[in-house]
Image (cartoon, rainbow, N blue to C red):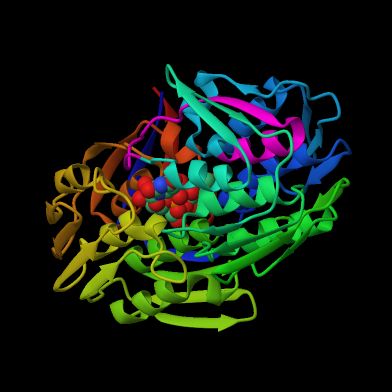
Amino acid sequence: MDKYVIDGGGRLCGSVRLQSAKNSVLPLFAASVLTQERVVIRDAPHISDVACMAQILKELGARVVFRDGDAVIDSADACSHELSSVLTGELRSSVFMLGSLLSRFGRALIAYPGGCDIGLRPIDLHLNALKRLGVSISERDGFIFCEGERLRGAEIELDFPSVGATENILLAAVKAEGRTVISGAAKEPEIVDLQNFLNAMGAKVAGAGTDVIEAEGVRTLHGVVYRPMKDRIEAGTYLIAGAACGGEVETVGVPPENLRLLLHKLRENGCKIHTKNDKIRLESSGRLQCNRRIETMPFPGFPTDLQAQAAALNASCEGSALIVENLFETRFKYVPELQKMGADIVVNGRTALVRGVRTLHGACVTAGDLRGGAALVIAALAAEGVSEVLDLTHTDRGYSGFSEKLKGLGARIRRVRT
Ligand code: EPZ
């Protein structure tokens, strides 16, 4: 088990080379089985969630090779429609393989993806929508069996703009008979990236980025070479680290409108933010004001995937901040670890009251989930003294070259094998 040893208190300065977006690349891997031709996903991030998704495709019989940073996927020989519980347990987001497997094989058998470290993660919206497309679903002994030889387009109303459910419906609808209209769809930029990818394969999808998406079924999809969007959550994580430590951090490749609410909150903290095309540059004195209130919401609201990082920033700002987590039930598990560093945070259900302290101090802390782990790294970088962050399996899921990129900004951080 590796750990980070971080000597905090230094400023961060420099530009970060961003990875392709984890939450776009994962559905693109799922979509690659919609064709029997070769799919190349450029600059696939070197993170364990992508490796896990590659393993899932290999289990189905596809060939996945990583070459010069690209993922080369040939699924002509894919023949299985069954996903083992090991992999669906490890990667929650494997649930959107349902849509792909149904499109490709007319059936799918996956183990019920369990809850995880940030909440129950039900999939009722996925299953109800698939039924609207003509899929029959039975659940037994923790497995979900879906059958739908002839999927047909339908009007689907989502009660909640679920990202995964929107993606799953699109993966099932692009080759269904007739037209599908998704109302109440998620509007995340990753959905737009999936639409662009599918259309590059010959699909007919329109409306992504709004809450109404239409797909006209086509008979076949062809191969594609595609460069995914850059990771806006990774970018936001480094900008928040720069704010917390003080200094100047620049990200390139994420349009400011994909992080609009975060940039608004960072300005509220007292940071100077300059943007030009897809460049974002943050300047921070390191002595900032707390945000009065941060409420996580579906896009374009404040991203839940940056909530923990924002709490770590506010922990050593002037004043106090109320953080409301509206999307997941238990996304404050990082708080006790921040308290070991001197943070004054009180959690009550879905809200956390953060009272800023002058500075955090180094401590030995343990990551419990992907974004909570990133928050602990940010806190350790801003704290005075040396910290250890244990259990890097979590941050390895979503941040490629995390310690190298931070070192490139001047952070005193080492990855140590224990
Ligand atoms: C995606 O998860 C992201 N993961 C998450 O990022 C992100 O936090 C989330 O969207 C919200 O933006 C990927 O894209 C791989 P949802 P997803 O369906 O699709 C409830 C990260 O850190 N819900 O929009 O699972 C659900 O319980 C990860 O990179 C139902 O009730 O999110 C949650 O409360 C974490 N029934 C809310 O909707 C359903 O059928 C948001 O879930 C589906 C979801």
- Magenta includes 231? no
Q: Residue at x 52, y 75 (%)?
A: 281
Tell which of 141 and 319 is nearer to you. Answer: 141
Q: Judge from the rendering whether residue 134 lies leftward or rightward of residue 6; answer left or right.
A: right
Residue 92, placed above or below residue 217? above
Tell which of 317 and 85 is nearer to you. Answer: 85
- On the rendered image, what quadrant is the C terminus found in? top left
- Return the x and y of residue 89 as percentages of the image width and height: 46, 26
Q: Residue at x 51, y 33 (%)?
A: 91
Tell which of 203 and 13 is nearer to you. Answer: 203
Bounds of the magenta segment: 96-120
* Residue 412 visible in the current orientation: no
Tally the marks.
0
- Return the x and y of residue 165 as percentages of the image width and height: 52, 49
Residue 418, placed above or below residue 42? above
Return the residue found at the far top: 141
- Magenta includes 98? yes
- Return the x and y of residue 307 as percentages of the image width and height: 33, 58
Q: Residue at x 24, y 43 (%)?
A: 333
Q: Judge from the rendering whether residue 91 lies leftward or rightward of residue 242; answer left or right.
A: right
- On the rendered image, what quadrant is the N terminus found in? top left
**Quadrant in the picture for residue 160:** bottom left
* Residue 128 visible in the current orientation: yes
Q: Judge from the rendering whether residue 395 lies leftward or rightward of residue 38; answer left or right.
A: left
Residue 212, placed above or below residue 367? below
- Return the x and y of residue 402 as percentages of the image width and height: 50, 46
Q: Judge from the rendering whether residue 359 lies leftward or rightward of residue 174; answer left or right.
A: left
